[in-house]
Image: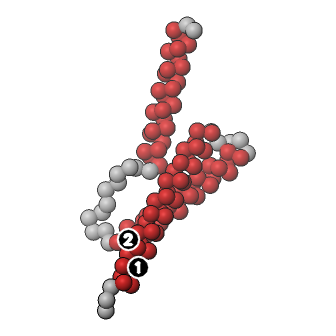
Amino acid sequence: MDMKAVSAIQNFTNARAASAIESYQQARPATEPLPEESSASETLGRVAKDFASTLAESEEIAKSSMVGDADPHALVQALAQTELAVEAAVRVRNKVVEAYQEILRMPV
C-alpha cells in the first residue's frame, strides 16, 4: 500500500470517529446540569420525555434504514441509544417498585 492510501484511510477513520462522537454528544449530553429548583416530579417528567424522544428518533432512523435512506452507522448508534434508554427505564422502574414494597412493609 502506498503512504497516501494509508494516510487517506487514517484520516477517514479519524473523521468518522470524531463525527460519531460529536453527533452522540449533541443528541444526548452525558452530563447535563439540572436546574437548581428541580423537583422529583419535574425530573421524572423530563426523563420520560427524553426516553420517548429517544425511542421516536431511533424508530425514525430504523424506518429510513429499511428503505435505504439511513447510514448503517446511524442505525447502530440509534439502536445502542435505545438499548441504553430501555435499560435505564427498567432500572428506574425496579427501584420504584422496591421503594413501594419497602413502604408496604413498614409497620403502621
**Left or right: where 67 falls relative to 39:** right
Question: Could you tell me which quadrant the N terminus lies in?
Answer: top right
Secondary structure under tag 1 reads helix
Residue 88 percent coordinates (x, y): 46, 59
Residue 16 percent coordinates (x, y): 51, 31
Question: Could you tell me which quadrant the C terminus lies in?
Answer: bottom left
Q: Is residue 91 above or below residue 61?
A: below
Q: Residue flagged by tag 2: what amino acid is it? A: Glu
Whether residues under marks 1 and 2 lie with C-beta atoms below 8 angstroms apart, the answer is no
Q: Residue at x 58, y 43 (%)?
A: 76
In this figure, which residue is indicated by the disc labeled 1?
101
Q: Nearer the viewer, residue 71 or 82?
A: 82
**Left or right: where 6 falls relative to 98:** right
Q: Nearer the viewer, residue 69 or 87?
A: 87
Q: Nearer the viewer, residue 56 or 2?
A: 2
Kindly identify which numbered label has been placed on residue 42. Answer: 2
User: Could you tell me how far apart the alpha carbons at marks 1 and 2 are, in whole angstroms?
Assistant: 23 Å
Residue 104 percent coordinates (x, y): 38, 84
